[in-house]
Amino acid sequence: MTPMISARSVRKHYGNTRVLEDITLDVAAGEVCCLIGPSGAGKSTFLRCVNHLERINGGRLLVDGKPVGYSERGGRLHEMRGRELSRQRSSIGMVFQHFNLYSHMTAEQNVSFAPVTVHKRSRSAARERSRELLGRVGLADKADKYPRQLSGGEQQRVAIARALAIDPSVILFDEPTSALDPELVGEVLEVIRGVADQGLTMLIVTHEIEFAREVADRVVFMDGGVIVEQGPPAEVLENPREERTRTFLRRVL
Amino acid sequence: MTASEAPTNGVESRKRQEDSADLPVVQRRYPWRWACAGGVVLALAWMAWILATTETMEWNVVGEYLFSSEVLAGVKGTIVMTVLSMALGMVLGTLIAVMRLSPNPVLTSVASLYQWFFRGTPTLVQLIFWFNLSSIFPGFEVGVGALGFDVDTNRVMTPFLAALLGLGLNFAAYYSEIVRAGILSVDEGQSDAATAYGLSRFRTLRHIVLPQAMRVIIPPTGNELIGMLKFTSLASVVSYSELLRSASDVYNRTYQVIPLLVVAAIWYLFMTTLLSTGQYFLEKRFARGAQRTTTSTLAERILTDVRGRWAKRR
């Protein structure tokens, strides 16, 4: 079976700063994969490469068997134009550290915006779906609120509903709880847990080690732009083989 | 204070504190605030009285010309020129702002060059330049091959077109900076999210970035619009018939300079007042999703109060 996400020797640099060096990683369909590691390890950058928010400088990156941001024609990879790219992105949901809800739209509009404008769903159907999804993340009564009127936890739950609304095959979570007050982290993790149980492929950058232990099928520890160690949470988190992993876990646990 | 007194006092004060919970509250009074307000109002009234009673102000002449057809034609000219040059400036200005933020270095430089030139030379000079364009290009050809025909520049470059180009192109340069500041004020995460969900660059700009930038763009635009309304008076030098031109046409005939300038001033004030009211409502419209309240002026406070009473009565 082809993996949902497949990275082969992915490299990324900004000028002379190397952020990713030789990342090779497969994420199977339906797998929940947590990326952990110290800040500056390249976790978020890798995530942004998966939907071509960042362009990779070397290696191959495939989602659902197709190269990200490039299409193959005549034995060459051509960088995609707007429409192709947006079609590819339209099957990848993303949840950001700072929520990034469209601040001039209500919660309901935030969730139904991409389905209407990109996926060409009818406005009424999208609105209905939006309300249903908001209900699922426990915000049925907040559908007409603007992001500013919601707490951080509520905003992030709306953002998760927005990701679900496009019926994605993959959802990328970029430190979904890092910007939240401690007492709000729980409600967001609860919602992510619920999504994980549905069998969606998820790539989660997180600092919540306990959460990773519980929800992940696989934990990947990154440091300095490389994958140091990966495996089931029980292995990586309980009996890490590498010294760097051990040092990191000692610091955060 | 002796040692034996201290505990008694403590009990007393605690007792007094408990009692004070039931005492009536007297708000602080501000006599100086009233005195200052009164003084200022008196001074204003005195000035108004002087203006109203000075004979050389010739208020009857003001009344005579305020709604004369000549002046009204000037008012119309001012409104038309303001609207059209604003429209030209806003469209062109937005385009230049987007060019300046584009990843294409040639477009960025051309946009900067435009701003540099049109902001760096006086509007008056530009107006006169357009008006005298025929002295460098006496005529030009329109069309292709056999279908082309010659045009006399003086025929095309009317006072109207000279004023429109002079004011509009100049305004575009200023407006582009307002738009650029607005676009930059929108958090990058917003376009990240829009891009990640499959929106093209253009649609991200149109649906996500510009609507949010509007909140920052509208207040200075209102200012600029009011400024533009007054700037159109410059067009009088290229003999475009706007308000100031009409007024001066009259006083060149009758020598009643001050009363006609007062007529013009009254019209300018009337129009700018209308515009600032419109700006207030536009700002409210685009403040959706942003909670910062605007500080209210006296007029707004009265308006809210009246509205409240009206609602209560119904």
Image: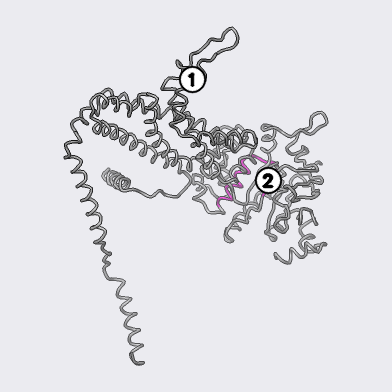
Q: Judge the density around disc 2: few (<14), some (14-19), many (≥20) Cα neighbours within 10 Å.
A: many
Residue B39: numbered disc = none
Name the foreground residue: A231 vs B290.
B290
Residue A99 at x, y percent in the picture: 59, 49
Chain of residue at mark 2: A
Tell me which amino acid carries mark 2. Answer: Ile
**Relative to the observer, which residue lies in front, B34 or B69?**
B69
Residue drawn at x 55%, y 40% as measured from the top left: B209
The residue to which callout 1 is attached is B135
- Stretch of the chain drawn in magenta: A154-173
Residue under the image location 74 percent in, 63 percent down: A248
Q: Amino acid at mark 1?
A: Ser
Q: Which residue is mark 2?
A: A171
Work out whether residue A72 can be spotted.
yes
Q: Nearer the viewer, residue B174 or B178?
A: B174
Q: State yes or no: discs 1 and 2 in contact (Cβ < 8 Å).
A: no
